[in-house]
Image: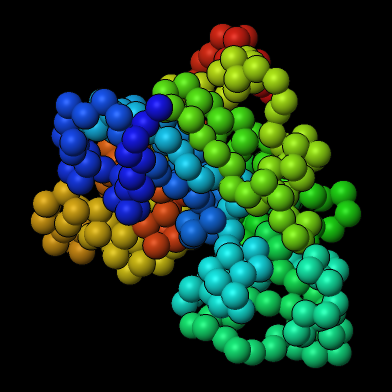
Amino acid sequence: FWKFIMHDSFRFTPETWGGFMKGCPDRALDTHIYQAWMDPASRLTFYNNACAQKKQIALMEREFGPVIVGEWSLATDNCAMWLNGFNDNLPGFPRSPCKYIPCSAPYMGTDQPGTPVDIGKPVQGPYGTGMSGPSFGLCPVDRDWMTERYNRGEGGMSWMSSPPEAPRGRDGTDEVMSMLALKKISAFSGIGHGFYFWNFRTDLYNPQWSYMLALERGWIPKGNLNDDRIVNSCHREDEGAFVCESNRDAPEDSLRAGMSYALSEEGKDPRYIYDLHGNDLYDEADTIFNEFWDSRRAQGATCDFGGVATLAETNKTHSEDYYTDD
């Protein structure tokens, strides 16, 4: 049993925790790994980010010691009601319009102030720095994912402009959440010392935050953690089958901003990119973005760069075993 379990204060790096309390056998590090606060992105970005966590966990196990993923969920947006506090939200969140469903009955009874929810009133105060709450009897929950056919493939970004509730026959949420759960469990279970889904259940129907509902939907598998679906779920990401490419539709000025950031972070002089235009600029961006992302994805870096980059699967020849999860 551990006597000391410390939260990483959202600084899950060896620079912060490496060697801390070295020699003490009774301590572990608690880290919370969420994707709900990431910028909107393709399903491939969330898949890669999930699988990349195993490298960071392995690094911290080596530099510090036992690591526990004390909180994780399947949320890919910030829509869940009161996620950031009662009637509150963080500035700038949620990043995309949320899905709304009828609010549930008050679990503490209708004698509580403000209950039941008045279907004739908009969001009621008091407010914090943001807003999140019932409006005309409806409450915000996580967005749906569109099927690949209507998302321009796995790497497509069209879901950002899609309605938060998928039209009938176009809902790909079950597929995305099931795959994401497998990849997260694979990353957490094979290397670390335990992981806990947050939360056990929710008041609203929001399976991305409810372990019980995620089980009912079949998103989280039941049974052995050595299930081949879990063990092999990250094989594409682990084999480096993806590259970070520039978005050919992005304006050149926006592209240069992303390139300048990546080069500056690497201690390189970005001035030369202002002499590049057209295909030369986009080709150079491909190289800069992919090298930066590939070297830092284990630390949680995403292929975004201000919305001017996206992940793409490379053309490789694979054996039949490669496609066992298709």
In the image, 30 versus 101, the foreground residue is: 30
Q: Residue at x 31, y 60 (%)?
A: 258
The C terminus - image quarter: top right
Report the label total.
0
In the image, 140 versus 165, the foreground residue is: 140
Image: 41 above or below 219 = below
Q: Residue at x 69, y 88 (%)?
A: 124
In the image, 101 versus 154, the foreground residue is: 101
Viewer can see residue 192 = yes
The image quarter containing residue 230 is top right
Viewer can see residue 286 = no
Q: Residue at x 30, y 29 (%)?
A: 26
The image quarter containing residue 228 is top right
Q: Position of residue 86 (x, y in %)?
A: 60, 75
Image: 100 above or below 72 = below
The image quarter containing residue 264 is bottom left
Q: Position of residue 310 (x, y in %)?
A: 47, 49
The N terminus - image quarter: top left
Q: Residue at x 32, y 54 (%)?
A: 9
Q: Position of residue 62 (x, y in %)?
A: 26, 25
Residue 17 relative to residue 168: left or right:
left
Is the image coloured rainbow, by chain, by secondary structure, or in one colour? rainbow
